[in-house]
């Protein structure tokens, strides 16, 4: 994938805004260009990639809807990977949203929206169709939220960073993952990959789905 390298078991993305950092990450020079280290302890997507995940498929002009963008840590790395595309960042918390807005500065392909991921019809008025829905929303019904947004924005691919404890703290995470996979399949989606994110993220699994 353009803009992504792995050196000494560390991930780096080609900095879309050279000289600027988003969350205090380390930067390096590689072949005359500036790269930002992608911390797997602060990004479930980085953890997924370091654990061997292969389901992230992005082109330079890809369009991504990011649900649960928080302050924009992971979203900023995705924006590095789609320099000619767009990352539409939806965040529900006003406090996190303020940080997100600040971190979008200097990144013209990264656009923040204050909104509720369970109500895609609200931000559908400002977000166009996308190639990928990436979701990191810690609440019940995570698989349902992903499917609703994939439908609303005609996305062919989805990635769900599922937090099992947000679904049911009393159940074994493996049971939660299996139940979510079964529901996604019953809704007509193809589950291509399920990868647990331990030890980087406890009780989390990344699910990659397509139509």
Image (cartoon, rainbow, N blue to C red):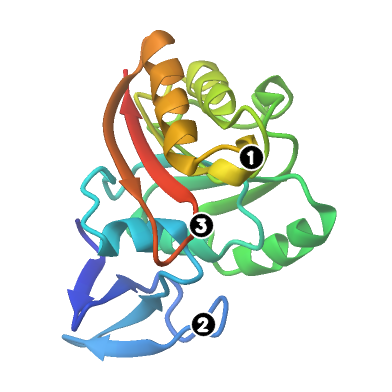
Query: Where is residue 13 drawn, in percent x and y?
Result: 32, 70
Q: Which residue is mark 2?
A: 20
- Horizontal relation, residue 147 to residue 84: left or right: right
- Name which quarter of the figure residue 171 lies in: top right
- Name the one closer to the observer, 51 or 33: 51
Q: Position of residue 146 (x, y in %)?
A: 52, 28
Q: Secondary structure at mark 1?
A: loop
Quadrant of the image for the N terminus?
Answer: bottom left
Q: CA distance from mark 2 to mark 3?
A: 15 Å
Determine which of the numbered discs, if any, sits on residue 170 in the image.
1
To which residue does mark 3 refer?
Answer: 75
Secondary structure under tag 2 reads loop
Q: Is residue 83 visible?
A: yes
Q: Nearer the viewer, mark 1 or mark 3?
A: 1
Q: Nearer the viewer, mark 2 or mark 1?
A: 1
* Horizontal side of residue 55 vs 18, given as left or right: left
10 Å crowding of disc 3: few (<14), some (14-19), many (20+): many
């Amino acid at each position: 994938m353009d803009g992504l390298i792995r050196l000494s078991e560390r991930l780096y993305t080609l900095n879309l805004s050279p000289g600027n950092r988003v969350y205090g990450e380390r930067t390096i020079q590689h072949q005359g260009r500036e790269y930002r280290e992608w911390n797997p302890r602060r990004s479930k997507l980085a953890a997924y990639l370091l654990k061997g995940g292969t389901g992230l498929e992005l082109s330079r002009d890809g369009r991504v809807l990011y649900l649960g963008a928080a302050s924009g840590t992971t979203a900023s790395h995705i924006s590095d990977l789609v320099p000619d595309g767009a990352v539409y960042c939806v965040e529900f918390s006003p406090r996190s949203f303020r940080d997100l807005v600040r971190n979008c500065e200097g990144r013209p392909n990264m656009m923040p929206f204050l909104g509720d991921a369970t109500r895609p019809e609200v931000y559908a008025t400002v977000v166009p169709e996308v190639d990928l829905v990436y979701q990191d929303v810690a609440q019940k019904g995570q698989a349902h939220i992903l499917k609703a947004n994939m439908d609303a924005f005609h996305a062919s691919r989805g990635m769900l960073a599922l937090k099992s404890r947000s679904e049911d703290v009393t159940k074994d995470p493996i049971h939660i993952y299996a139940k979510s996979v079964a529901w996604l399949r019953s809704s007509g989606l193809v589950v291509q990959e399920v990868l647990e994110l331990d030890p980087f993220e406890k009780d989390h699994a990344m699910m990659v789905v397509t139509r």
